[in-house]
Structures are given as C-alpha cells and as structure tokens.
Image (cartoon, grey):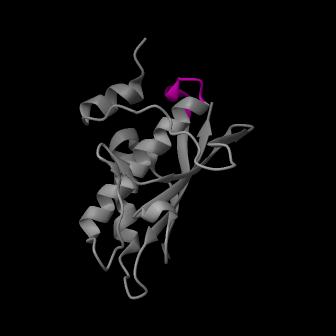
Amino acid sequence: MTSKIETRLAELGVTLPDAPAPAANYVPFVITGNTVYVSGQISNGPDGLITGKLGDNMNTQDGAAAARSCAISLLAQLKAACGGDIDRLVRVVKLVGFVNSTSDYTEQPMVINGASDFMVEALGDKGRHARSAVSAASLPLGVAVEIEGIFEIE
C-alpha cells in the first residue's frame, strides 16, 4: 500500500531521504505516548550543508529554502519514528526554528515560513502548527537554519 503522505510529497517533487543520523550524543527522536519529539534538523540540501548568516551573506528567500530542507528532514525522522509508516501522523503540533542571523536581522518568521508553508502544502490541515522563530548568533557547522518539531501520531 502506498503512503498517502509520500504520494503527496512525490507530487511536490520530494522524496524523503533516509533519516539523518545524530551528530553528537543524543537520539534523533523520542516517543512518549502519542507524541514524537524530533531533535533539531539542520539545513542540508543535495549539495551538502546549507550554510550562511541571514542579514550578512544570505537573503531571506535562501533562508526559507534552507528551512524547507529542515522540514523535509523532520518528516524523514518522523517516518523513522513511525516504523516507516508516516501515515500514522495525526498532526504537526509545533515547530521551533533557529535562524543563524545578524543582530539587526528581523525576518526570522519569514525564514521559518519556508518550513511552515511546506508542512501545510505537503500535509494540509495536519501540517498546521504552533511555532517559534528565533535568531541565533551561530548554529552548528555554520548552517543557516535548525528546526525541531513535535508531532502527534496514532
């Protein structure tokens, strides 16, 4: 049986990658009850890490694309947490986005919209969520964006 969510992703030209392995001493996700907490996923594209600092050497549109890449990794981790059956997703509960940006940059919400918009485009109403979008002076490996997520599953 074909996953409804993965069919929709394919319509958007997205194939979920294998869930990224943790880069340090933590687990990629924790399940408690019907809630999945996914560790922060860093911006990574087909050519490797998406690095840069918003307000310096990266613009808001590029930052939103980096946030979209984080959302794809979040869904890959969610699929792994669901034993391969991502259709167990009930809803995206919350995203917390960190934007590597200068002290005077103020468009963090527009950057994290890259992930939020993707979740709604891919998942419909299941993708609507609460959210935070904050600035960070620096992020691991110099990436532009890192996003963590909370999901409800069946």
The residue drawn where x is 69% and y is 42% is: 30
Can you give x and y, in whole percent of width and height, for residue 117 in the image?
Answer: 34, 54
Above or below — where is 82 with respect to 98? above
Can you give x and y, in whole percent of width and height, for residue 9 in the image?
Answer: 33, 33
The N terminus, quarter of image: top left
Can you give x and y, in whole percent of width and height, for residue 109 in the image?
Answer: 40, 70
Q: Count the numbered circles shown.
A: 0
Q: Is residue 81 magenta?
A: no
Q: Is residue 88 magenta?
A: yes
The answer to whether 36 appears left or right of 95 in the picture is right
Magenta residues? Answer: 82-89
The residue drawn where x is 38% and y is 42% is: 124
Q: Which of 46 and 30 lies nearest the eye of the viewer? A: 46
Q: Which of 122 and 49 lies nearest the eye of the viewer? A: 49
Residue most extreme to the top: 1
Q: Quadrant of residue 22?
A: top right
The residue drawn where x is 63% and y is 50% is: 24
**In the rendered image, is residue 125 in sight?**
no
The residue drawn where x is 58% and y is 48% is: 23
**In the rendered image, is residue 64 in sight?**
yes
Q: Quadrant of residue 33?
A: top right
Residue most extreme to the bottom: 104
Q: Which of 146 and 37 lies nearest the eye of the viewer? A: 146
Above or below — where is 17 with respect to 65? above
The answer to whether 40 appears left or right of 122 in the picture is right
Can you give x and y, in whole percent of width and height, for residue 147 in the image?
Answer: 50, 57
The C terminus, quarter of image: top right
Q: Quadrant of residue 54?
A: bottom left
Above or below — where is 82 with respect to 60? above
